[in-house]
Image: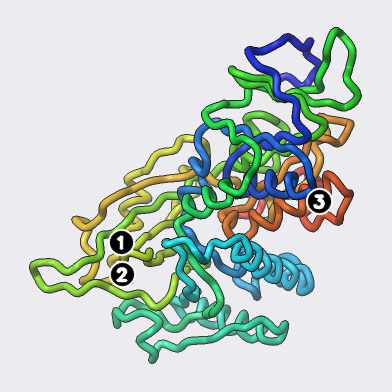
Amino acid sequence: MTISHWRFSPSPETVHTDAVVVGAGICGIAAALAFERRGMRAAVVERGTIAGGASGRNAGFLMRGAADHYADAIRLYGRERARQVWKWTEDNLADLRREGIEELPSYRRIPSALLALNEKQAEELRLSTALLREDEFEVEWVTEGDDSVFGNRGNGVLGALVNPNDASINPIHMVRHLAGKLKGTVYENEPVLDIAPHTSHSTHDGGLVAVRTPARTFVSPRVLLATNAYAPLLIPSLSALVTPRRGQMFALRNAPDAVGRRPLRLAYSYYANYGSEYLRQTADGTIVIGGCRTYFAGREIGYEDVTTDWVQRALESFASRLLGAAFSADDITTRWSGVMGFSPDGLPLVGPLPEFPAGNVWFCGGFTGHGMSMGFRTATAAVAGMVEGAANPFKMSRCVERVTHSTPRPS
């Protein structure tokens, strides 16, 4: 990407607009809605299709919390900050419900359960349960004697922290539902070639920015980069703050068969091993299973969007442990991957890019695998910060010193 002023030359089309959003995932679509609801014209530019990246390739969890369980988050961020983040994710889901996602056929109002698979995890999750209650969050602790934790006895589940008000959804359906509320255009299949201060006839046009694609040049006074993991490909300096990590999943057919297996009916959506593994049931009964990236963390970094044998075999082993005889690799119908953007401390990154001194090009991303739980509300806050100078709860500047002087947080 070229940051220096480049002389403006007409493309096949020049589009003047009040705001340009780069990326049409959950974050980008939410940002465009926030601009439009302030009476501004917004153009969304997407290299692929709406929700074609990680926003459409995740497990569809709409759950409270971040990458860590609550007790660990308190150790990492402090009690008040952890409480704010957990409340933020609750409010994110409330925002999405106000947008009408409950009317979508794939939406399920279903609790999520953080499973304890050994005594150490059980101790930590019981502590998290107590701390959540102290901070006035609704939470339940379900013990191993309750078959609703997981019907397959002998799978090692000792108990679970249950978030009773969570939900799940097909993420593609959700993002496209939100995109349907936009008045402006989503320019799909238009990769951004560069973002630079706009120059016309050798004169700098007072803080305008040009976003160039093969087909068009978008000229605007403000640009929000909402490409999450892919942002460093446009702004190389973000590579110190956003790490691309590949997540993998598969879908499991869940139907009666000739040997008499009964379809599973899962009581919750499940997180295990601190979120390293997860599974849920879709509205049509299919079981979706993902994770196991952390066991191969050094091999699962980068932009190659493929499934790998080592992760897929580990996922099969995990599914076999939890589902027992109900699992058969022959029932796997689809395998897929998606590239997520991880921040140094596990929380989102929002703020202006120093390459643009006018402060009119911002980044919003680094959701660390929790874009569904944080993306909508965080993007809305990013637009409020850009346009009105509102408080920014996830200032990107907090991580600059961290990545300069310390070792990044383990994946």
- The residue nearer to you, when weighing 398 against 211, is 211
Under mark 2, the amino acid is Arg
- Mark 1–mark 2 CB contact (< 8 Å): yes
Say which label, 1 or 3, has the lower sequence index. 1
Residue 402 visible to an observer of this rendering: no
Badge nearest the viewer, 2 or 3: 3
Mark 1 and mark 3: span between their CA atoms?
A: 45 Å
In what quadrant of the picture does the N terminus appear?
Answer: top right
Under mark 1, the amino acid is Ser
- Determine whether 5 is above or below 167 in the image: above
Circle 2 residue: 321
Circle 1 residue: 317
Badge nearest the viewer, 1 or 3: 3
Relative to 25, is 171 on the left or the right? left
How is the protein colored in the picture?
rainbow
- The residue nearer to you, when weighing 125 against 83, is 83
The structure residue drawn at horizontal position 75% and vertical position 25%, both measured from the top left corner, is: 16
Q: Whole-percent x and y of residue 180? A: 56, 47
Tell me the number on the disc at residue 384. Answer: 3
